[in-house]
Image: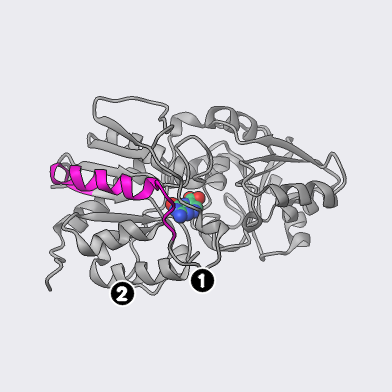
């Protein structure tokens, strides 16, 4: 059972094609997991919006592209907003394709933080597994996730325990972490580089705090990321003196990790219950110690004093002091932590274990 080849349909986020950057961390999660599952010998169909592309091919991978309008992101909406389905929406089209294909596959893994696939778990025979990509960003999503937890507890998984705490689950949460392809990240031992920050440029990521730390240190801050919220980015530009931020934009992994690895410290300043914190693991993969607010996923992944430092949320002074002590962290610890806990192979093994457990559980609809 353990090593039986699984045939799995993966369904991508509907808020932007893979490679656009609009999908946030879940894009990298999907691309890494597909490669990890294939390296374990499984057969994958990936359903994703038109424009999606993966940086590799395999005879065990088929990609089906679906056209349609992006789903509005829950991060740009109020928690109390209703579910929206725009005209010509890509979301229902993705799931119509799943329904047509599903009888040939062992399981479906959903990566969309959306109501429809959760509802289909209750109302169809399809074994849909949900890797929930965020904390509770919407009341209707929280309600539906809690309901699926009651009915199909083995078909929900989260990236970290802290993320799962946003939900009222019926059983202990299934935690699968995350994982990225080791071959894409090179260890850099340089200890005298600049300080860096990366993430979607949006309020919940707290870039302004990292800029304040850089100013207190009298240094520039290298910033990578997709500008999701333009006004927010302009406000940051105008609020702080020119030249502090070196904007690098959203780079493909190869280029991003090359530049990221040159940093002596990576600052992470979430203002929300960050589900995981892909960028901090990418930093560690390059040997860069992480100084993060003790909140959400980063607070669970950083072992204080080993692969970085944890600072009380919103404590700029604490962040500055920790950055000044970063040379106390052995950069090799960061790479070792990444290889042990967050390679895409380890991640894929955890996901396969989750799917096999869910398939063997006889939680059926009519109990
Ligand atoms: N919003 N409606 C919707 N659907 C998603 O899949 C979604 C989202 N907002 C953010 C998001 N996914 C990803 O950025 C996660 O990685 C956080």
Residue 242 lies in magenta, yes or no? no
**How many marks do you count on the picture?**
2
For marks 1 and 2 on the same chain, the one whose residue lies earlier in the sequence: 1
Q: Residue at x 31, y 56 (%)?
A: 117
Relative horizontal placement of residue 190, taking residue 165 as reference (left or right) = right
Q: Position of residue 70 (x, y in %)?
A: 46, 46
Neighbours of disc 2 within 10 Å: few (<14), some (14-19), many (20+):
some
Q: Nearer the viewer, mark 1 or mark 2?
A: 1
Residue 96 lies in magenta, yes or no? yes
Q: Residue at x 20, y 57 (%)?
A: 357
- The secondary structure that dominates the magenta segment is helix
- Quadrant occupied by the C terminus: bottom left
Judge: label 2 CB < 8 Å from ligand 1. Answer: no
Q: Position of residue 229 (x, y in %)?
A: 65, 49
**Viewer can see residue 350:** no
Q: Residue at x 31, y 72 (%)?
A: 147
Relative horizontal placement of residue 142, taking residue 124 as reference (left or right) = right
Start and end of the magenta stretch?
84-107
Q: Are marks 1 and 2 in contact (CB under 8 Å)?
A: no
Q: Nearer the viewer, residue 218 or 29?
A: 29
Which mark identifies residue 170? 2
Q: Position of residue 27 (x, y in %)?
A: 45, 42
Q: Residue at x 30, y 43 (%)?
A: 10
């Amino acid at each position: 059972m353990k090593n039986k080849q699984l045939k799995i349909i993966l369904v991508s986020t509907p808020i932007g094609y893979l490679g656009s950057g609009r999908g946030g961390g879940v894009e990298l999660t999907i691309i890494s997991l597909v490669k990890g599952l294939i390296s374990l010998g499984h057969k994958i169909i990936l359903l994703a919006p038109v424009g999606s592309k993966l940086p590799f091919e395999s005879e065990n991978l088929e990609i089906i592209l679906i056209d349609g309008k992006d789903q509005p992101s829950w991060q740009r909406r109020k928690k109390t907003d209703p579910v929206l389905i725009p005209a010509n929406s890509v979301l229902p089209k993705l799931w119509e394709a799943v329904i047509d294909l599903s009888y040939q596959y062992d399981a479906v893994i959903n990566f969309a933080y959306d109501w429809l696939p959760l509802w289909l778990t209750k109302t169809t025979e399809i074994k849909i597994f949900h890797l929930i990509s965020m904390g509770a960003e919407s009341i209707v999503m929280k309600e539906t996730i809690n309901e699926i937890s009651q009915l199909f507890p083995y078909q929900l998984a989260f990236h970290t325990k802290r993320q799962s705490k946003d939900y009222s689950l019926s059983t202990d949460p299934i935690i699968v972490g995350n994982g990225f392809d080791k071959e894409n990240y090179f260890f850099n031992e340089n200890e005298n580089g600049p300080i860096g920050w990366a993430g979607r440029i949006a309020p919940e990521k707290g870039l302004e705090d990292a800029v304040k730390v850089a100013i207190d240190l009298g240094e520039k801050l290298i910033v990578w990321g997709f500008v999701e919220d333009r006004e927010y980015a302009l406000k940051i530009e105008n609020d702080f003196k020119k030249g502090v931020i070196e904007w690098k934009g959203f780079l493909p992994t190869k280029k991003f990790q090359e530049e990221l690895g040159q940093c002596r410290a990576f600052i992470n300043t979430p203002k929300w219950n960050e589900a995981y914190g892909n960028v901090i693991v990418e930093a560690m993969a390059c040997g860069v110690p992480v100084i993060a607010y003790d909140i959400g996923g980063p607070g669970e992944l950083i072992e204080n004093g080993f692969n970085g430092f944890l600072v009380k949320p919103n404590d700029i002074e604490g962040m500055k002091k920790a950055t000044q002590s970063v040379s106390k962290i052995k950069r090799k610890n960061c790479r070792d932590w990444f290889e042990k806990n967050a390679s895409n192979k380890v991640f894929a093994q955890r996901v396969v274990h989750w799917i096999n457990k869910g398939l063997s559980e006889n939680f059926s609809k009519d109990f």
